Amino acid sequence: MPEIHAHSIRPATPSDEAALGELDRATWSTLHAVMPRPQPPYAPFFDEHHRPEDFLVAEERDDTGELRLAGYTRLVPPTPLACNTHVRQIQGLAVADWARGRGVARALLRAAFAAARGDGANRMTLRVLGPNAPARALYESEGFVVEGVLPGEFFLNGRYVDDVMMGRSLAP
């Protein structure tokens, strides 16, 4: 296997659609997904509610020089309300299996913080399923705190699962 070098984060472009769709399907899991497993024919990854400009992607270059998509995050205002423009919400974070444990998710989060600050936001929120301990630990290590829990909000894999709301300030 080729050695992997440092990752870079950039805004998504329309040309990323196929790779992002593949990554999204490959990383689907009941640990974080409330929607059923995607089935062919697959819906487009980008649509009017999921625009390329809403996504940051992580790439890694292997020792052959080939860039591979390592992960993505979706960062959007939580509502269209003017009184809510100071908040950004992470609505999706995925890392390819081969790239896990390399700091890709942490780099995506930190890039999301910088992008949100650059857009004038001073607060970041997200929702995560209660049983997703690895994601919750990552978010907590990056300054998120639990701000609310909707107990048993989803019925997944034969059990009720909490929907955990987390947030953090983006102040320096």
Image: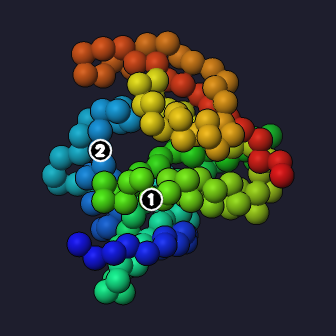
Residue 104 is left or right of residue 160, and the answer is: right
Mark before the other along the chain sequence, 2 or 1: 2
Q: Which residue is mark 1?
A: 102
Helix, strand or loop under label 1? loop
Quadrant (top left/top right/bottom left/bottom right) for the N terminus: bottom left
Horizontal placement of 9 versus 131: left or right?
A: right
Q: Position of residue 41 (x, y in %)?
A: 17, 54
**Image coordinates for residue 143, horizontal then vertical, percent:** 69, 40
Which residue is at 54% across, 41% downward? Answer: 138
Asked whether, in this view, residue 96 is left or right of residue 91, the answer is left
Mark 2 and mark 1 in contact? Answer it, CB < 8 Å.
no
Q: Is residue 63 above or below residue 93?
A: below
Q: Is residue 37 visible?
A: yes
Q: Position of residue 87 (x, y in %)?
A: 72, 44
**CA separation in Å, label 2 and label 1:** 19 Å
The amino acid marked with disc number 2 is Trp
Instruction: In the rendered structure, find residue 28 and report the number of the disc placed on it.
Output: 2
129 in relation to 80, above or below = above
Q: Amino acid at mark 1?
A: Arg
Residue at coordinates 40% horizontally, 78% vertically from top-left? 61
Examine the rendering and report whether any part of residue 17 can be seen.
Answer: no
Q: Residue at x 29, y 44 (%)?
A: 28
User: Within 10 Å of the Cα at label 1, are there few (<14), some (14-19), or many (20+) other Cα atoms?
Assistant: some
